[in-house]
Image: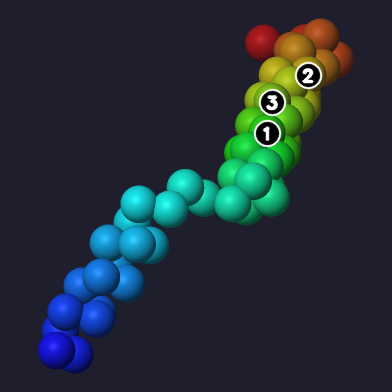
Amino acid sequence: MNRRIFRAEALRRHAAPPSAPAAAKEVGDRALVLLWCAVAVLASGLAVLTAAVLGGDG
């Protein structure tokens, strides 16, 4: 009996779609991570270019 209740609850939770705020937060977090990755790549590229232009020691 108890096993049947747990199975029904598990099936209900699995079938329920994620709530809209949780899904929106996940998308927002992913966008924020991608934004910070882009900033890091651009900053490192700028540092390499600056070192190449100003370094000049060869």
Tell me the residue that label 3 is attached to.
38
The one nearer the camera, 48 or 14, is 14
Report whether 2 appears left or right of 55. left
Residue beneath the point at 38% across and 62% down: 13
Tell me the residue that label 2 is attached to.
46
Residue beneath the point at 63% across and 38% down: 27
Query: Which amino acid, mark 1?
Result: Ala
User: Would you identify the image quadrant in which residue 36 lies?
Assistant: top right
Can the viewer see residue 29?
A: no
Nearest to the eye among marks 3 and 2: give it: 3
Tell me the residue that label 1 is attached to.
31
Question: Tag 3 or tag 1, which sits nearer the N-term?
Answer: 1
Nearest to the eye among marks 1 and 2: give it: 1
Report whether 17 appears left or right of 27. left
The one nearer the camera, 25 or 14, is 14
Above or below residue 57? Residue 5 is below
Query: Which amino acid, mark 3?
Result: Ala
The one nearer the camera, 14 or 37, is 14
Q: What is the CA distance from the residue labelled 3 to the residue labelled 2?
A: 12 Å
Report whether 5 appears left or right of 1. right
Q: What is the CA distance from the residue labelled 1 to the residue labelled 3?
A: 11 Å
Q: Secondary structure at mark 2?
A: helix
Report whether 31 appears left or right of 50. left
Question: Tag 2 or tag 1, which sits nearer the N-term?
Answer: 1
Above or below residue 39? Residue 50 is above
Mark 1: few/some/many CA within 10 Å (<14, 14-19, 20+): few
Q: Quadrant of the C terminus?
A: top right
